[in-house]
Image (tube, grey):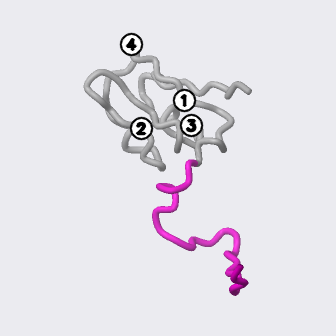
Amino acid sequence: MSRGKLEYVRGGHIHACATSLIMKTGGWRVFTPSVEEKACNRCKLCVWFCPENCVRLTENAVEIDYDYCKGCGICAHECPKRAIVMKREEG
């Protein structure tokens, strides 16, 4: 077993690019966005404002990638129709 020098990463510092692609961060969430499709007018504000690029607009629906969604609520806050509601995570 090799005992090489350990590298410690200081907290609060960016140590690599695009780490969210390899680390699923959805487990941090306390609140989950829920989309009420009937109320949605497909304005794409939720897509544009999501800091994690978790919200996608498809032909039929607004899809949220819950593997990476941290539950920040920005999508719900920016929705002019209030079609996204934040609900407390179960469990």
Which quadrant does the N terminus fall into? bottom right
Look at mark 1 in the image and give the residue it sits on: 33
Mark 3 is on which residue type?
Gly
Q: Do residues under tags 1 and 2 come within 8 Å of each other at their CB atoms?
A: yes
Judged by depth in the image, the label closer to the viewer, 2 or 4, is: 2
Assess disc 3: are there few (<14), some (14-19) or many (≥20) residues with their C-alpha within 10 Å of its C-alpha. Answer: some
Which quadrant does the C terminus fall into? top right
Spatial CA distance of label 2 from label 4 is: 17 Å
Q: What residue lies at 67% left-to-right and 75% top-to-bottom?
A: 9
Q: Residue 73, labelled with which disc?
A: 3
Spatial CA distance of label 3 from label 1 is: 7 Å
Indicate which disc, 4 or 1, sits on the residue closer to the N terminus: 1
Look at mark 2 in the image and give the residue it sits on: 55
Indicate which disc, 3 or 1, sits on the residue closer to the N terminus: 1
Spatial CA distance of label 4 from label 1 is: 15 Å
Spatial CA distance of label 1 from label 2 is: 10 Å
Assess disc 1: are there few (<14), some (14-19) or many (≥20) residues with their C-alpha within 10 Å of its C-alpha. Answer: many
Q: Do residues under tags 3 and 1 come within 8 Å of each other at their CB atoms?
A: yes
Indicate which disc, 1 or 2, sits on the residue closer to the N terminus: 1
* Residue 31: in magenta span: no
Look at mark 4 in the image and give the residue it sits on: 38
Q: What residue lies at 41% left-to-right and 36% top-to-bottom?
A: 46
Q: For this view, does 74 lie left or right of residue 39?
A: right
Judged by depth in the image, the label closer to the viewer, 2 or 3, is: 2
Q: Nearer the viewer, residue 48 or 1?
A: 1
Assess disc 4: are there few (<14), some (14-19) or many (≥20) residues with their C-alpha within 10 Å of its C-alpha. Answer: few
Q: Return the x and y of residue 34 as percentages of the image width and height.
A: 52, 24
Q: What residue lies at 51% left-to-right and 61% top-to-bottom?
A: 19
Magenta region: which residues? 1-24
Q: Quadrant of residue 44?
A: top left
Indicate which disc, 2 or 4, sits on the residue closer to the N terminus: 4
The kind of secondary structure element at disc 2 is strand
